[in-house]
Image (tube, rainbow, N blue to C red):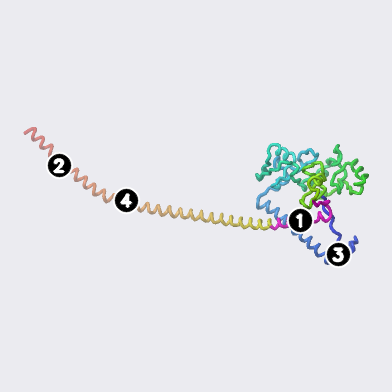
Amino acid sequence: EPPPPSPPNLTVGGSSGSSAAAPPAVAAPAAAAMAAQASAADFTLELRNFVSRELGFDMDLSSACVFCKTAFKNSRLTRSGRCEIKVLHCLHSSCGNCLEESLRRSDVVLCPICDARTEQQSYHKYLCNFAVHQGIDRCTIDEQRSIACDECVEACPAVMYCQQCVRSLCMECSDHHRRSKTTNMHCLVNLMEQQEHSMHRAAFCHQHTDQKLEFFCETCDVMCCRTCILQDHETHTYKLPAGSLVEKQRQVVQGQIARLRDLAQRLQERHRSVSHAIQALDDDIEVAKEDIDKMRLQVQAAIEERRQALLREVDGFVAQHREIFERKRAALTSTMVFVWRAIDFVEKVLVRG
């Protein structure tokens, strides 16, 4: 990742004096740009709070490997001698060791957070998390731990940083760098004094992993190494990534970010609208449940009242008909007793007569 270009000189006549006033034609766009950046930063912070508060996203997940859950600054060193953090296609990040292990086990990398599938088998084709790398390197320096030299095979502790080569150099390599005809004009700064946002790592080709990405192919819109230029892009239009080309690509990315912000704002409004609809639905459901409970009580009361009425009708019907049946049974009983007496009397006459 190349360092960001220096801001343009906005003073009159190119003078460096602080008292020179910028012309209105230049100051107005600069002020508008600063206002736009401030507004974008405010929206980004608001969106971060929205994602954390209303969507319940754990922000700590963005500072640890999705596989081993180890904080990135405590990740194990890879074969390059540094902590490497790779970005999956779902934009979750993994430490280099876990990604390599996952690629050895399967042809498909399954994100344990969102279950997104990444069918990229080449480790070097996964994008590095540049912001996390900067934080790791700055933390390493602040904790007075050494960063390996990017130049020598001994990987001695680095003490200087070349802003043109984007490399950390040990003392001996720094001396060679200053004496070399091709690099003696490069700007070397003390690694301890390097700001976090300026601590870049050199980007290497995913096909020729020992070669830096030094050219930008405008035909394919991709960064290339020297070997790629000779093999696949020889007839294409390519340039060194500097000056106007970097600014052009920066504007393209800023335009894409602006469109994403607009999309995020629309999605945020849509999410709030859907959330309000869900809340209204929940409220309606609660009211419906209360109405159902009230109706249940009313129905139960009506059923009980009807039951009591039916029981009274049954009791009246039984009492009325029981009296009739009792009179009939009493008459039958009296008749049977009379018949029995008649039979008994006649039999005795026959026996004794």
Marks 3/2: CA distance? 140 Å
Q: From where the camera sits, is residue 202 visible? A: no
Between disc 1 and disc 3, the foreground one is: 1
User: Is residue 24 depicted above or below 170 in this figure?
Assistant: below
Residue position for label 2: 338
Q: Are marks 4 and 2 in contact (CB under 8 Å)?
A: no
Q: Residue furthest top?
A: 351
Q: Earlier in the sequence, mark 4 or mark 3?
A: 3
Which residue is at 29% across, 51% downward?
317
Whole-Å distance between the Cαs marked 1 and 2?
A: 123 Å
Please give the residue where the numbered disc 1 appears in the rendered image.
Answer: 252
Three-letter amino acid code at the position of disc 4: Val
Q: How many marks?
A: 4
Position of residue 215 measured from the top left corner of the image (x, y, whole percent): 82, 49
Which numbered marker is on residue 22? 3
- Mark 1 touches mark 3? (CB < 8 Å): no
Helix, strand or loop for disc 1: helix
- Residue 241 magenta: yes
